Amino acid sequence: MEFVGMDDIILKLRQLGARAARVENEALRAGAKELQETMSRNAPGPSDKKRKHLKENIQMSRVKQKDGVKAIEVGPGKESFYAQFLEFGTSKMSPHPFVGPSIDESAPRVTEAMAEKLRKGIGL
């Protein structure tokens, strides 16, 4: 997901110095939480009682930084390796996508949650 129109807010965050990193991280977590909730709601239901339900295994990583870009990964945990088969299908099963549609569905709420945290954090 790419966000447009947050350049001014990001500039003010950088001017805040050390506190800015914490505010940025809080905003990322707020957006990731929205996506996590949507993805859990859209994940296919249980088909095998022996496995942990996919809906209950949508996880959020910590804030990671690479090449100056911060991100949080949201998606099925390692116990739900079969999620890729549901998302993309197999030679014997049609796809039942839930990750892509969840990103599309939650994008406005993710943006708003992040913007709200950023506004609060920089005092707007």
Image (tube, rainbow, N blue to C red):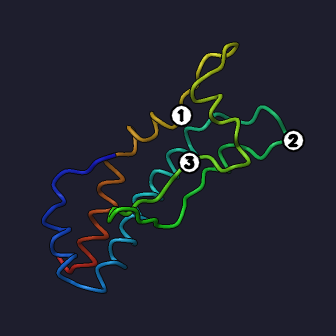
Residue 71 percent location from the top left of the image = 41, 59
Relative to 81, is 15 above or below? below
Tell me the kind of residue under disc 2.
Lys
Badge number at residue 98: 1
Tell me the kind of residue under disc 1.
Phe
Q: Quadrant of residue 83?
A: top right
Find numbered disc 3 in the image and state the secondary structure of the residue it sits on.
strand
Instruction: Spot the residue most to the right.
Output: 50
- Is label 3 or label 2 in front? 3
Position of 16 compared to 86: left or right?
Answer: left
| Residue shown at 19% from the left, 60% from the top | 6
Instruction: Spot the residue most to the top.
Output: 92
Badge number at residue 75: 3
Q: Which residue is mark 2?
A: 50
C-alpha span from label 2 to label 1: 22 Å
- Is label 1 or label 3 in front? 3
Q: Earlier in the sequence, mark 2 or mark 1?
A: 2
Tell me the kind of residue under disc 3.
Gly
Residue 118 percent location from the top left of the image = 27, 70
C-alpha span from label 3 to label 2: 20 Å
C-alpha span from label 1 to label 3: 10 Å
Callout 1: 10 Å neighbours few (<14), some, many (20+)? some
| Residue shown at 61% from the left, 50% from the top | 58
Relative to 8, is 77 above or below? above
Badge number at residue 5: none
Q: Earlier in the sequence, mark 1 or mark 3?
A: 3
